[in-house]
Image: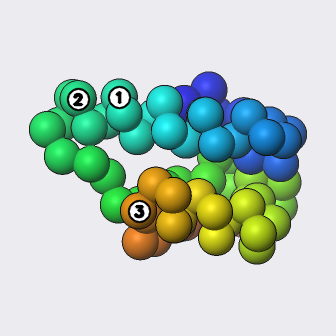
Amino acid sequence: HSHTPFLRLGEGVFSEVRQNRDYISQACGDQPRWVSYPNGRDDAIPDAATLEWLFVDLDLRLGFTTLGA
């Protein structure tokens, strides 16, 4: 939601992704099933335990990012 790299958010990553999911759900009428990690950098992607929690708790199916050349 704020485009802060996930690793910099610490425990705040959960509320950050939930807030974004809720916003998209209201705007589109359906819950998104994917997340795009901001900034395309190594610190954009959370550790495996955090990813597992996010994907299970928020019912996500796919996560991706972009990498600059």
**Cβ atoms under marks 1 and 2 closer than 8 Å:** yes
Residue 54, placed above or below residue 62: above
- What kind of residue is marked 3? Asp
User: 35 and 11: which one is in front?
Assistant: 11
Where's residue 15, x and y in %?
61, 34
Asked whether residue 55 is in view, the answer is: yes
Helix, strand or loop for disc 1: helix
Where residue 59 is drawn, which disc sits there? 3
Q: Which residue is mark 1?
A: 23
Disc 1 from disc 2: Cα separation: 5 Å
Number of marks in the image? Answer: 3
- What kind of residue is marked 1? Tyr
Specify which label sits upstream in the sequence, 2 or 3: 2
State which quarter of the image contains the N terminus: top right
Where residue 62 is drawn, which disc sits there? none
Specify which label sits upstream in the sequence, 1 or 3: 1
Q: Looking at the image, which residue is at 41% across and 71% down?
A: 61
